[in-house]
Amino acid sequence: MTRRRWIADEVSGNRAFLVGEHADHLVRVLRARVGQEFDVVTPAGVRRGEITSLTESRVEFELGEEVSSKATTEITLALSIFKFDRMEWAIEKCTELGISRIIPLIAHRTDSHLAAASAKRMERWRRLALQASEQSRRAVPPEISNLVKLPEILNVPAAMRVVLDETEEQTLLRDVLTKLDRTESPAEKTGIILAVGPEGGWTEDELRGFREAGWISVSVGETILRAETAAIAAVAIVRSALVGC
């Protein structure tokens, strides 16, 4: 039977702890009990954990044997800010799909009010990513970087840098990924970054900047997708193409 996975808030020797809302959810919503076993993620890896004591604000685990975790391909998503409810949906689903890092991005067409309010949303986004990581049995949640403006990501190093471009008519994301498959060094296969524009898309100047910095413009299909759909579709395509690489 597959055990549910939790990411520890605190670790001390062979003891791990969930605290605050994290513990409250396990105790009140899932009705956990002493003696129940879960997988517990610690800085040293994933281990089997047995609950030894619990209250609504603190759950203690005794840690046992290590649980193996399969390494996954690293994917970074540079995600332009858009309506928060839809953006949260994208963060949650891309986390479930195995994204390694999310960079919230301010583009030219990012709504100014959303851009101004984004800094206050960072902790919520990280909490959502943590919850989605536990639900999908990830060993670690994705890193959610601090908010940046577009020029700051143009020269981010990666084995492949791809920008989703709704005006691109010939180059599909799934086709360019075959080039990453043939990379000789296995280490290089862990580095791909996807850039997704805001509602309204990228400006011509922004797309020119991507091209001049060496990014590949791609499409994910014939239809025009909402920003959150494009992000989820792109991550799913990459994950599917690189399984086992």
Image (tube, helix red, strand yellow):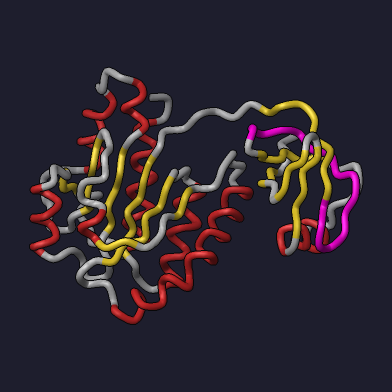
Image vertical order of residue 202 relative to residue 37, above or below: below
Extent of the magenta region:
44-59
Q: Residue 205 vs residue 231: left or right?
A: left
Q: How many marks?
A: 0
Q: Residue furthest front?
A: 12
Which residue: 31% across, 39% down? 192
Q: Quadrant of the N terminus?
A: top right
Asked whether 226 or 122 is in front, the reply is: 122
Q: Is residue 56 magenta?
A: yes
Q: Quadrant of the C terminus?
A: top left
Q: For the view shown, which residue lies furthest in the bottom direction? A: 113
Left/right of residue 104 with respect to residue 7 in the rendered view: left
The x, y position of residue 17, in whole percent, is: 77, 48
The answer to which of 151 and 179 lies nearer the viewer is 151
Residue shown at the point (31%, 56%) measured from the top left: 230
- From the viewer's perspective, tell me whether residue 238 is left or right of residue 155: right
The residue shown at (29%, 79%) is 112
Q: Residue 241's spot in the image, x, y percent? A: 34, 33
Q: Position of residue 173 (x, y in %)?
A: 24, 42
Q: Name above or below for residue 49 compared with residue 59.
A: above
**Snapshot quadrant of residue 176:** top left
Residue 22, x across and y down, in percent: 71, 58
